[in-house]
Amino acid sequence: MKKTFTVLSLMLASTFAFAQSQRLVLVEAFSQASCGPCAAQNPALNAALTAAGTNKVVSVKYQTDWPGVDPMNAQNPAEVDTRVAYYNVTGVPSRRLDGNQGTTVDATTIDNRYNIPSSFTLTTTHTFNADMSAATVNVNITASQAFTASGNLVLHVAMVEKEINFATAPGTNGEKDFYSVMRKMIPGDAGSTLPGTWTSGQSQPFTFQVNTPNYIYNLGRIAFVAWIQDNGSKEVHQAGYSAPIPVPTLAGVSSLTNVPTFQCTNSFTPSVTIKNNGSTTLTTADIKYQIDADPEQTLPWTGSLAAGQTATQVLPVVNSTPGTHTFKAYVANPNGTNVFATIHDTKTQQFVIIGATGQAAPIAQNYSSTTFPPANWFITNPDNGPTWVRQTAAGANSTTSCAKMDFYASTAGNVDEFFMPAVDMNITSTSAALDFYVAYATYQTEQDKLEVKVSTDCGSTWSNIFTKQGTALQTANPQTTPFTPTATQWRLESVNMTPYLNQPKLLVKFVATSAYGNNLFIDEINLRAGAVNGIENNNISVNTFEVFPNPFDNQAMININTTKAERISVEVVDMLGNRVFSQDLGVVNGLYRQELNAANWNAGVYFVNVTSSEGGKVTKKVNVIK
C-alpha cells in the first residue's frame, strides 16, 4: 500500500506542477467589403466559427482599406493598419489562427489548436454605464504554470461588433452581413505590456474604461475579445471573450423618405421610419432632425412598437436655402431613457436646392481647386460605392487634375450622376455648345457608358444629348490595371446646346453607368456660346472645316471644303491674341488641305481662324500638347 501511495503522490505532484488551462482559440481575419474573393470565402469561415461556438473559438475581423470602398474601415482605419503591418498582410482575405500565418481555418484546425492546453487562464467581462456612452472592461490573467516569453508579451483587448447588417451592400462585392468586426483597440493598438516571466499561480488584473465610438451600428451587439500575444513569435497563448449585453430599448431611424436629391423650391416635407431594435416595447421617443449645423429640431413620438417593428412619421415642413445641404435624423430618449445607443442609427442624406434662377453661362470647370465636388456641383451615388472623385493626373490641355469615375471598382449596373450647376441659358448668341474632354480605357470588352442629359423642368423629365460606351468611348487601348490617362489620351467632345438657348434654369448631368470595366475621366468642361466644335459660321461658304488630330503635339492638318470659289486665308492666334501662324491660301474652290507645324509653339489653347475675301470668318479651338 505504501508503495502505491508513493506513486500516487508523485503522480499528483506531477499533475499540479505541470497543470495547464483549457485554451480558447483566436482567429483574426482580414477582409474587405469590396473584395470579391472575400465574399466567396467568408461564408465558409463564418460557418466554421459558428459551428465551433464561442466556448471553443472567438474571432476578430479587420476590414482593410483596399481594394475598394469599405465604410467600416473608414471609421477606424489606423488601428486596422497596425494589425495589417504587424502580420505583414499583403492581400485579402487573410487569416491567422492564434497568430499562425497561412493556417487554414476550419473545424479540424480549430479542434487541433483547441486541444493544445494553455499556460494561462484569462477571464473577460464588461459593463456599460447608465447612458451606454462608456464601457468598463475587466480582464484577469493567471499563469497556470511557470512561463517565459520569447519576446515582448502583450495583452490586446478589442471592442468588436458581433454582427453588422446593411440593407444594401456597402462595398462592391455584394456582402451585406459582417461578423465580429473590430471597432476599437483598448487602450490602443499597441496593447498593454505584460511581464515576460511568470511563476505558477501569478495573477494580474486589468481594468479599462472606453468611450463608445459614435460609429457603432448597434450597441446591443458590442462584445470584447482579449488575448495574450508574444511579439517575438506572434503566437497567441490564450484568449478571452465577453459577450454582448442585451440593450433594454434601442430605437433608431432606419430610413429617410421625401428628402429630395434636388428640387427647385425651398421647402419639402420629409418622413422618417423609426425601428425598435431592442427587446422592450417602444412607446415614446424623440425624433431629432437637423439641416447642416442649423439648430436641432425635436418631434415627440408616441405609439407601440414591439421588438423589430417599424413606424413611419411625417415631419413638419422643412425650409432651406439654395445650395447643397445635409439632412440628418435620429431617435433619442426611447421610453424616457437617455440611451446613447439610439444615435447610432442616425440617417443622413445630401440634398440640393436649385434656387429661382440658374448660374449665368458660360460655365467652365477644370477641377483645379481641391474642393470636390466644386461649388454648386453635386453627385448622386445611390449604391454608396465608388463614384465621381477628383483625380490628380495628366488632365486635358496640360492641366494636372480632372474628374474620375471609378468603373474599375464599381459593380456592373451601378449608376452615378455628376450634376453641373443649374444654368441660365439666356446667352446673346445664335448657338451654344457643351465642350468637355474625355479619357477612357476598357478593361477588356466592357461597355462602360457615359451620357449627358438635360432637363428644362427641374428634373421631372430628362433628354439624352450624348451617349458613348465601350469602344466608342475609349481613348486608349484596353488594360487590366487601373487606367490613368496621359496627356495624349484625351479626346474633345462637343455637344450642340442651341436648342436650349433662353432656358432660365437648365439642368445638365453626366451619367456614368458601370459595366465593371476601367476608369473614366472628364476635364475642361465648358458650356458656352458658339457652335459645336468651336466653329462660328458668319456668311462664309466653308462647308467643312476640320483640324486633325485635335489635340496635337507638333503637326496637324487643316481640311477646308468650300461650296464656291472664294479667296481664303488662315491664321492661328494664342489665348492672348498673338498670331503664331498665317497663310494666304489664294482662291479655294472645294477641298483644300493646309499643314500646321506647331513644333515651336507652347502647349496650350489656340484659335484657328479661316477668313474669306468677302469678310466671312469661321473659328475652331485647338489644343497643343507637349
Image: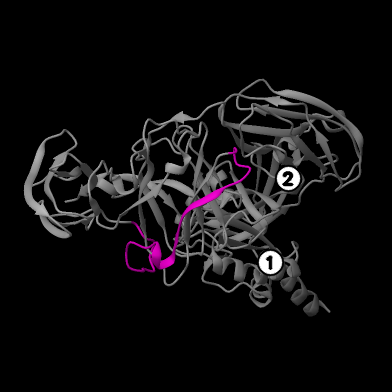
Q: Amino acid at mark 2?
A: Asn
Tell me the CA gap for discs 2 and 1: 20 Å
Q: Residue 163, located in which quarter of the rendered image?
A: bottom right
The magenta-colored residue range is 457-484
Residue 144 is situated, as x and y percent measured from the top left of the image, at: 67, 59
Residue 213 is situated, as x and y percent measured from the top left of the image, at: 64, 38
Residue 217 is situated, as x and y percent measured from the top left of the image, at: 69, 45
Label 2: state its secondary structure: loop
Q: Nearer the viewer, residue 437 or 501?
A: 501
Upstream in sequence: badge 2 or badge 1 = 1
In the image, taking residue 80 as reference, residue 260 lies left or right, namely right
* Image position of 126 with respect to 263: above or below: below
Q: Amino acid at mark 1?
A: Asn
In the image, taking residue 603 as reference, residue 307 lies left or right, namely right
Could one spot residue 84 in this view of the protein? yes
Q: Label 1 neighbourhood size at 10 Å, few (<14), some (14-19), many (20+)?
A: some
Residue under pointer 1: 46
- The kind of secondary structure the magenta stretch mainly shows is loop
In the image, taking residue 527 as reference, residue 43 lies left or right, namely right
Q: Is residue 228 magenta?
A: no
